[in-house]
Image: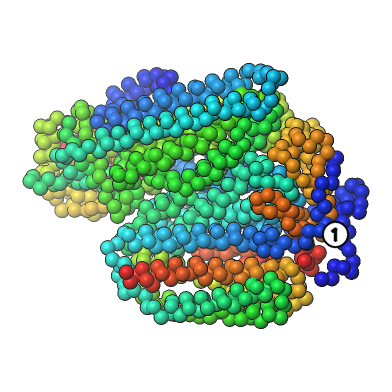
Amino acid sequence: MKERIALDASHLPQHGMGSASPSWWGTLAFMLIEGTGFALAIIVYLYLMTLVPAWPPNAPPPDLGPGTWLTAVLIISVIPNMLVGRWAAKREMKKVRIGLVVMCAFGIAPLILRIFEFPALHVYWDDDAYGSISWVLLGLHTTHILTDLVDTLVLTVLMFTRHGNNDRRFGDVEDNAMYWNFVVITWLPIYGCIYWVTRL
Amino acid sequence: MKRWLLLSLPLLILAGCQSSQSALETHGPSARHLGDLIWLFSGVATVIWLLVVLVMLVALARLPKHAAEGRAERDARMKPVVIAAVIATAVIVTGLTVASYFTTRAIGEPREAVLDITVRGQQWWWQFLYSDPGAGGFETANELHVPVGKPVRLRLESPDVIHSFWVPSLAGKMDLIPGRTNVLTIRADRPGVYRGQCAEFCGIQHGHMSLFVIAEPVEKYEAWAALQRSAAAVPDDADALAGRTVFLSKPCAACHTVRGTEAKGKTGPDLTHVGGRGTIAAGTLDNTRGGMAAWIADPQTVKPGNNMPLVTLAPEELRQISAYMESLK
Amino acid sequence: MSEAQSVPPSDTEFEDGIVEERLRRLWARRRGFWGALAAVDHKVIGRRYIATAFVFLGLGGLLALAMRLQLAAPEARFIDADRYNQIFTMHGTTMMFLFAVPVMEAMAVYLVPLMVGTRNIAFPRLNAFSYWTYVLGGILLWVAFALDVGPDVGWFAYVPLAGPEFSPGKRADIWAQMITFTEIAALSVAVGIVVTVFKQRAPGMTLDRIPLFVWAMLVMAFLVIMAMPAIMLASTTLILDRLVETQFYNPAEGGDSLLWQHLFWFFGHPEVYIIFLPAVGMVSTILPTFCGRPVFGYLALVMAMIATGVLSFGLWVHHMFTVGLPRLGESFFTASSMSIAIPAGIQIFCWLATLWDGRPRFQTPLLFIIGFIITFVMGGLTGVMVASVPLDTQVHDSYFVIAHFHYVLIGGAVFPLLGAIYYWFPKFTGRMMSERAGKWAFGLIFVGFHMTFFPMHMLGLMGMPRRVYTYQPEMPWGNINLFVSLSSLILASGFLLFFIDVVRSYRRGEEAGDNPWGASTLEWAIASPPPPYNFRRIPVVESREPLWDCGETLPVASGLRLDRRELIVTSVVQGLPEAREASPQECIWPFWAALATAFLLIWSIFSPWAVVWGSIPAAAALIAWFWPKGTPEDEG
């Protein structure tokens, strides 16, 4: 077909930031997928709870210690995480580098606490359905911490290389920060189920 | 929809001669209400379908004259018709929901059951446990005797996988789920044999898991139940007596019970009165001496994958066991 | 930053011929074996995806014929019970997970970027990864079947039958892990479709100018995103029960077998609409072209599709009417199940109105649409029957249901799909399919279909249950079954003719030209088959039917670079240009990532440690995939 120039796109930026970037929407879509997964797993937890007279059925409620410490660490981590996102939006390379290193530490710390969380459940995955769903909820969330940690580590290394100083990379840092907030937020209902629903 | 029913009418009559297993040939109140509902829905569906196809054919055949008015005006003229059709859809759907509601209510009317029977679906046969606090309970398999005209409450359970109890001429189906108990009340209007089949896929021999509901007049039923309560008779026939010895000395007794003997196995069907049943292996074979012999001789060829193992028997022993089974009336 | 030093070449400076030449070089696909593995062009991936899905359709169809052979006579022994159970499981699994969902997504992968006027799908490498994952999952399932360890627990894999106690061996695990493969694939495509539709629409394509096909695919993608996690959770917990003795489905330890059914059907019911909504989009696109007018009730159709999508999540109990529901809920479930008839009615009435006012051209695509309306309305009406809780207790798990859902899935989705293949084949290949063969194929498929499936309604009401490998001679079903089996040969011959026509037309079909049907959507503005970059210049959309309204001249946008793959990103609602975005080059890492994922998933059938050790190569492949390659596309 013949063409008629109706729009000049040459003035447009060469990479969209925030909601103008497809990868921002992609991250959102994956969060929707995983959020649905978490929601369903929690529904399974509550469903199984309705089937038995007492909850937990054959075990004391989990110890509060490790899980609560982990929750505190995750909540505190939101502060440096938001700062990293903001610095990335402003293209402040030095601060972004420092912030990412800090966030790596905040990714590792909950994993260490998580090691103590499993025994604190006082139930094994193969004891009963309560044990199974508790382990799966913890396991599912652990994979999310782990995935984001690996992502953060790779980005940290990246930002120290020649590829770092680039709009696209700063955008990745922002998306990664958004995803970490998601990991923290999804933990809260799981924490409520595992540690407090069992004490109702 | 009607046309094919007329076409299949001869087949339906043929089926009625033996034992019916059809949702359209109803012999109990539940099935009758459901049959009416099926006809109602089919009728409405047929009319709607014919109307839609008719409108489509006219639309395809007509040559619209577009010269006079623009598309927007034509669309505006079609709009009320489309809206009316959507409203009609909503009204019909509501009507059918109401009809369903009344059917559910009619089926669910509380009726005082005269009999409680626990139905346990197993891979791949049906276990029926009759409990009667006064006269004592008993157990049978694959043939469910009920008194005519009386509501019978079935408690549906499963010790292994999910099965589904479906005797279409009497009632809709209901699942048997491990860890749960479902209740289904059935009532047969007339004496007769009503065939049913497992309707939930339950493993390799799902296809051979039939049952028969045998509705009899009350006196006949009572007589049958009294016989079932009694222990197995010691056969007077020499072959059958020898068969009894073989049966008890072979692995048979590890899985089957014959009340009145040392055979107290619980894995397979209770055989105390197996000779009185019409079929064996959940409707797979007729219960003749030949059928029984064929079954015992090679259960894995008759019904591959079923849980009855091959027990090696001499031809003589096979004949004797078959005679014994036949004698257990 | 540093761009001031050298201004990159832009398409404003050059004549059309030179722009095309430079774009062709820029978007060129890599050649050879490794080039094929590295492909990221949505048209290449889409074509592969469609072709592979049709191969699985053929395989699934052969399984159906095998079942019809076994059921042609009572107590037949052509196929033994064990094989038969594998075959019906494979048939359902193949048709649902390896044909129906993938082929619909594949049509979207090919067509959505063209219809919204962009140069590639969003996340092209994820799209390639999706295809490889899908193929590997399909191979896993079919190799297992060839080795006689195919799953035999039904495509629904109800526990406890599929659990560790009643299905020892690895058959059920293969089913469950194949689910994981296809779900990863489906979710990856869904993300690509959503973001393409949200962010890569041509400037000016406001929400109310989005083609209905694209709307349908958008709603479908959202259904995938919301429904598939349920089946992932279900299949994962099933594998855990089987592999490490978790107790999710063991009633003795607080588990529940109905939990499986809830999870499965929370996915399984939307699944039907994941397959059907794309067909709605196809019908709404093909019909206007052959009626010579825009579709009647655009807004109503969009709303009906969204309503169908939302309602589909409230209907899963629909499949559990015989598990012993509380009586109180029955009327509620009946009402909610039937309510979906209202958006379906809106769709049908809008199409009828379009036909009523149009001047139909009776070419093959329209024939399939006509066949679709006749058939789908019947399937919809029997759907209203099974939606009634009491009525369903008689027809559930009987042949009536088999008839019903084949009317909906074949009549409602495959007929439009075949129409769509006839319709878009010229765009895919540059060649027309044969009208003569097409009419014959339609006739055979339409007649064969009804002769095969209509009598199954009767069989079901006459008490024949589903999933039985045989039936007794005394049952009155023998003649009907024989009739059905013979009819299935007519249906099969129609499909055979279709496949032959596809192959023949691909080689020697008539040249198609850009817009052989005189259609209105953007994919017909460009050459057939489209060049790798799709559009020389990104179109600017000024109306809902761009090609009908723009006359001979397409309004376009200029000012895109010629030294990196570039497309335009627009705002979600109004389609206002926001940025020029790079689109990645060919990349081999999605292929390795898919292979590493397959390695992890297959190994995890045998050992839980696979999840630990297998994730190392998978993570390595993913890091390599995301690591910047220093190409112009990577740099901001």
Name the residue at 73% across, 34% down.
C519
Q: Quadrant of the N terminus of chain B?
A: top left
Q: Which residue is mark 1?
A: C563
Its colouring scheme is rainbow
Location of residue C16 in the rendering, given as x and y in whole percent from the top left corner:
89, 47
Of C118 and B277, the residue lying toward us: C118
Q: Identity of the amino acid at label 1?
A: Asp
Name the residue at 63% across, 59% down.
A26
Of B80 and B180, the residue lying toward us: B80
- Determine whether A143 is above or below C122 in the image: below
- Extreme residue toward the left, this view: B134
| Chain where mark 1 sits | C
The answer to whether C382 appears left or right of C594 in the picture is left
Of C352 and C33, the residue lying toward us: C352
The answer to whether A132 appears left or right of A175 in the picture is left
Name the residue at 82% across, 46% down.
A6
Question: Residue C5's image quarter?
Answer: bottom right
Q: Can I make out residue C59 in this image? A: no
- Determine whether B28 is above or below C131 in the image: above
Q: Residues within 10 Å of mark 1 (few under 14, many from 20)?
A: some
Q: Can I make out residue A196 in this image? A: yes
Name the residue at 42% across, 31% down.
B91
Question: Residue A123's image quarter?
Answer: bottom left
